[in-house]
Image: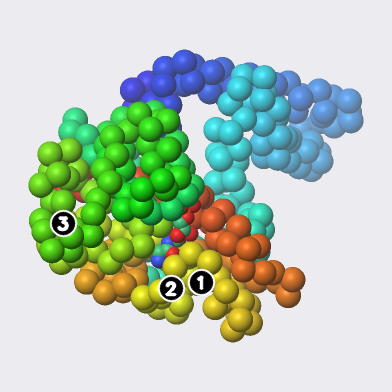
Amino acid sequence: MFQKLKRKWNVNGTQLFLILCVFAITGTTTAWVTRQATFWLQLDASSFWFWAIKIAILIFGYQILILLFAFPFGQFNFFWKYEKKILKRMGILNRQLPIGNRQPINDLNVVNYNNMQSTWKEQTVNIAIFASGAGSNAQKLIDHFRQQAGIKIALIVCNKPGAGVLTIAQKENIPALLIEKEQFFRGNAYVDELKQHNVDFIVLAGFLWKVPVALIQAFQQRIINIHPALLPNYGGKGMYGTFVHEAVIAAKEKESGISIHYVDELYDHGKLIFQARCTIDENDTAASLAQKIHALEHEHYPLVVEKLAHELQNRR
Ligand code: GAR
């Protein structure tokens, strides 16, 4: 049972122990507070208020206490995520996320990573991140999968010497492959090198070259991209990074967002997997919009990748 919980919550043995302590202490304290409250108010079991107060404390008091106890045990982040899930289920959090009115769009073949299952088989899914820039998404993916059994960031692929993502690869001790145009577009598209690193899945995170057909064929349905706008709008050749945000602001759009999609032979064109959106205020500039978009990307991309890697694992 403990192994199952560790996999489900994606935690190690020590963290599981601390989490179970928090649950136990919160349960006991809530029961004690409920008893004391009805005692101080001199309510007995025949009164309506006795039950109303008991239920209110059990439902709401419990949620507050669990966060209070989580803190000294160093488990606040775990329980805050847990609370957010509960609040969302109650319909309280859905529309009040920190950035604008963002909401995952759930009507287009979307990854619902909330129902993600941890059913890892033994073989690890090796991911190659392709990036050309600063690499903030790459960093988030690395952080997300660092402690995770079953998924490994096995390789960073970059086409730009000196790019920030190469420094990240070095710092994180992840092999990096600096690729050249000639071999990428007119050679083997680095398929052999990727296979040598046992790459199963390719994640583009700010990679600005078009992906050649040879690579798409070698990794069918196993290459995904993130685009900083709500495709099919504001995609295509030349639409990347800040150019996208400038175009969105110039068009006086009221909202923008992120799109995660499979990669095909055209720029920003393959089948959509996931979108999330944010509002644009009157005062927003391309730079402030870029920040909102990055926050959305960092929040969702690792979870979508995780979900797809699980599916890949289960297809094997
Ligand atoms: C990201 O916003 C990503 O969506 C965008 O480049 C940025 C890379 O940021 N990609 C595209 O525009 C692709 N068309 P990062 O290097 O900080 O991860």
Determine whether the residue tagged by mark 3 lies in a helix, strand or loop: helix
Q: Quadrant of the N terminus?
A: top left
- The residue under label 2 is 239
Mark 2, other Cα within 10 Å: few <14 / some 14–19 / many ≥20: some
Identified by mark 2, the residue type is Met
Residue, x 70% and y 40% (percent of image)? 60
**Are dots 1 and 2 in contact, CB under 8 Å?**
yes
Whether the residue under disc 2 has CB within 8 Å of ligand 1: yes
Q: Point out residue 208 in the picture as x, y percentages from the top left corner.
A: 36, 62
Residue position marked by numbered label 3 in the rendering: 183
Q: Give the vertical position of 264 relative to 137 (above or below).
A: below
CA–CA distance in space, label 3 to label 2 = 24 Å
Asked if residue 305 shows in the view, the reply is no
Q: Earlier in the sequence, mark 1 or mark 3?
A: 3
Instruction: Give residue 243's position: percent from left, percent from top.
Output: 51, 71
| Contact flag, marks 3 and 2 (Cβ < 8 Å) | no
Please tell me whether mark 1 sits on a helix, a strand or a loop. Answer: helix
Amino acid type, callout 1: Phe
Nearest the viewer among 56 and 120 is: 120
Q: Nearer the viewer, residue 129 or 126?
A: 129
First of labels 3, 2 by sequence position: 3
